[in-house]
Amino acid sequence: MSIADLTEASFLSANRISQQEWQASSVDWTTLHQIGLNHEANIEQLKETAEMYARIIQRCQYVHSVRWRVKDPQHLMEKIVRKTQPNTPTFKQKYVGINQTNYDTIVTDLIGVRALHLFKEDCLPVHDYLCQEWKNAEPPIYYVRNGDDKVFTELPSDVEVKIHPAGYRSLHYVFGSQPLNHTVFTEVQVRTIFEEGWTEIDHKIRYPNFSHNEQVCEFLLMFNRLAGSADEMGSFVKQLVSELEQHQKSIDEITHKSDENAQEVAELFKLLEQNESKQQGSQELIDKLRAQVEQLQAEKNTLQKATKHHVANRLDLIGKAQCKAADLMK
């Protein structure tokens, strides 16, 4: 439905806003309706800005994929109602006095872009990339779930860590750009693919009516923990493969060196045997060389056994991680 055809009653009904909530809001219908009309008229221009951000972010080699959206006019209007209800968890002081001339400087997520990556640690180079491309309009925030044991890594000093009430995990940025005659704000969220999956499902269920059903919330929390465990396992497997490759490289280097030494010793054996009758103590030298070859072979075998033991320990840790994930599903 076009905002021009939207009435106060139809808006409240479609967005499940009670009369009590509507009366508590400090915004009136005339102002709210005008904001909706203004935003609806600017959507195509905002889409162009969103596409520009998406193209630039996708160039980062650590970004798997990019999604974007321009806020729906009715969703914007519903958000303003929530943010202008004093003495509620959603109230924001900066929304007081919002109108059609200043709403786009107060609401900083009219454009939303999500940069998705595979491994949690990939957010660090993505952070550097974004901050090189644009200037932060607000300090970056890393949202974590209440109950997370710790932040997964040491974050840059300019990133503030906050607990998200709904359990979302992601890095949030607000960038300002000026494609035409005024500044347009864009919210960029950086999260893993697993975090994105959980967020999409949670958002679909909770919004726009904010489900408070205990069973639903319990299952969403369990799902949230599983997504976090999946990210941990992804990083663990990546580290495991890196360590295995490094061990294999060490083995290959020692094997190559051992083969070269063995070849050199074999040639010396042949030379010494040919001249055995002419040189004194040649047999003693041959025995020493043979001992050296045997020692090289022993070191090679020891390294191989140590590597197998290391792999076994890592696989045991993976098994424990899998059991932990299975426990969360019970």
Image (spheres, rainbow, N blue to C red):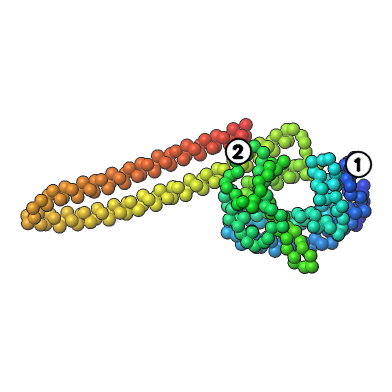
- 2 or 102, which lies in front? 102
Query: Helix, strand, or loop for circle 2?
Result: loop
Q: Quadrant of residue 134?
A: bottom right
- For the point 36% across and 41% down, which residue is it? 305
- For the point 77% across and 63% down, which residue is it? 183
Q: Can residue 189 be seen?
A: no
Callout count = 2
34 to the left or right of 202: right
Identified by mark 2, the residue type is: Asp
Q: Quadrant of residue 71?
A: bottom right
Identified by mark 1, the residue type is: Gln
- 135 or 240, which lies in front? 135
Residue 139, position in %: x, y? Answer: 69, 53
* Marks 1 and 2 in Cβ contact (< 8 Å): no
Disc nearest the viewer among 1 and 2:
2
Q: Is residue 210 above or below residue 255?
A: above
214 to the left or right of 282: right
Q: Quadrant of residue 223?
A: top right
> Label 1 to label 2, Cα distance in Å?
41 Å
- For the point 39% across and 41% down, which residue is it? 308
- For the point 37% across and 42% down, which residue is it? 306
The residue identified by callout 2 is 149
255 to the left or right of 62: left
Residue 131, position in %: x, y? Answer: 64, 59
Q: Quadrant of the C terminus?
A: top right
Crowdedness near tag 1: few (<14), some (14–19) or many (≥20) residues, C-alpha within 10 Å:
few
Residue at the farthest front position: 157
Query: Helix, strand, or loop for circle 1?
Result: helix
Q: Which mark is residue 19?
A: 1
Crowdedness near tag 2: few (<14), some (14–19) or many (≥20) residues, C-alpha within 10 Å:
few
Which label's residue is closer to the chain start, 1 or 2? 1
